[in-house]
Amino acid sequence: MSINHIRPWRHIERRKSRQIHVGNVPIGGDAPIAVQTMTNTLTTDVAATVAQVQAAAEAGADIVRVSVPDEASSKALKEIVRESPVPIVADIHFHYKRGIEAAEAGAACLRINPGNIGDEKRVAEVIRAAKDHNCSIRIGVNAGSLEKHLLDKYGEPCPEAMVESGLDHIRILQDHDFHEFKISVKASDVFMSAAAYQQLAEATDAPIHLGITEAGGFVSGTIKSAIGLGQLLWMGIGDTLRVSLSADPVEEVKVGFEILKSLGLRHRGVNIISCPSCARQGFDVIKTVERLEKRLEHIKTPMSLSIIGCVVNGPGEALMTDVGFTGGGAGSGMVYLAGKASHKMTNDQMVDHIVEEVEKKAAQLDSEAAAAE
């Protein structure tokens, strides 16, 4: 049940976009915001690439992108698509023929970059292949690879140049009666990205793919992405997203979901609310949370867990969570279930016990959801 009707300050009015499909995943309209990532293996190493796709899907990725830089990768893509549990987006740069080959190989979507894919005649051939093979297209504008005439016009990469590039490419697709497309305008600069996306959102009803490109390593990239994507999502902009990190693609998926979960836009797995700990803590909060995060990765059911070191905020936080634990004295603390104090548990048995309680609650919620269908 939505709680926005009693807490209007939580409400996010999503921008109205038309809906397309990437394989069996709806993008735009009233569909959930999709989380994407991209493999970083050699595409020609089918086994490694498929393993990475499967790991990303297990972490929650709705869609996975795979680079197709050469003909050998196009050939490998066919097998990757066949073994993938989620739709595959083929990343196409420089050579339009790779786009045609990827469509023929079964890609669900083609990502093409207006700055380097070639002239309109070549784009038309890619469009024809996409139509023939029921493929959608993502127009992927990047501040680092804008068309020369736009750089000459504006003097440097800027939001206006990025949006103009994207709209020019939309026109090409629409002139060829192709409408199954989404669009992104990415930059590594948070300000440039945010400004470009805001302008884009006002200029088209196409689904928008969000991203801060080349955001950096795990910590810095996560922060940069949370700031950039978070403000846009809060404004209601965005139908799908990728967090671009110099890290394992699985980490990109986790961060993407955490951003969406923090705004109440997607719910998956256990949302752990925990304190930073201090001298008042009745147990080692930091190590406990680390252990619980790993032990609870298998839970897909949306639910909440509070782990608070002492009674200052512990009982209050537990009121709002499905399961909670608050540190006390003498080597034990209080377990809360559905917001109410339930029973005490010793600190040394607490992790195993909480995992058990979370699994029990997840099974209950799953059963209730199935009965309601």
Image (tube, rainbow, N blue to C red):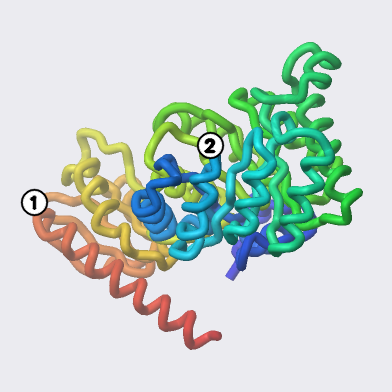
Badge 1 or badge 2: first in the primary sequence: 2
For residue 27, say whether it is visible: yes
Name the residue located 21 percent from the left edge and 50 percent from the top edge: 291
Residue 165 is situated, as x and y percent measured from the top left of the image, at 80, 32
Q: Quadrant of residue 359?
A: bottom left
For residue 271, say whether it is visible: no
Disc number for residue 226: 2
Which image quarter is the N terminus in? bottom right
Q: Quadrant of residue 23?
A: bottom right
Name the residue located 41 percent from the left edge and 68 percent from the top edge: 301
Secondary structure under badge 1?
loop
Q: Is residue 83 left or right of residue 3?
A: left
Residue 363 is situated, as x and y percent measured from the top left of the image, at 35, 77
Which image quarter is the C terminus in? bottom right
Nearer mark to the viewer, of 1 and 2: 2
Give the amino acid at mark 2. Ala
Depicted 24 relative to depicted 261: above or below: below
- Identify residue for label 1: 330
Secondary structure under badge 2?
helix
Which residue is farthest top?
A: 155
* Structural crowding at the residue carrying mark 1, measured as other residues with C-alpha within 10 Å and reported as few (<14), some (14–19) or many (≥20): few
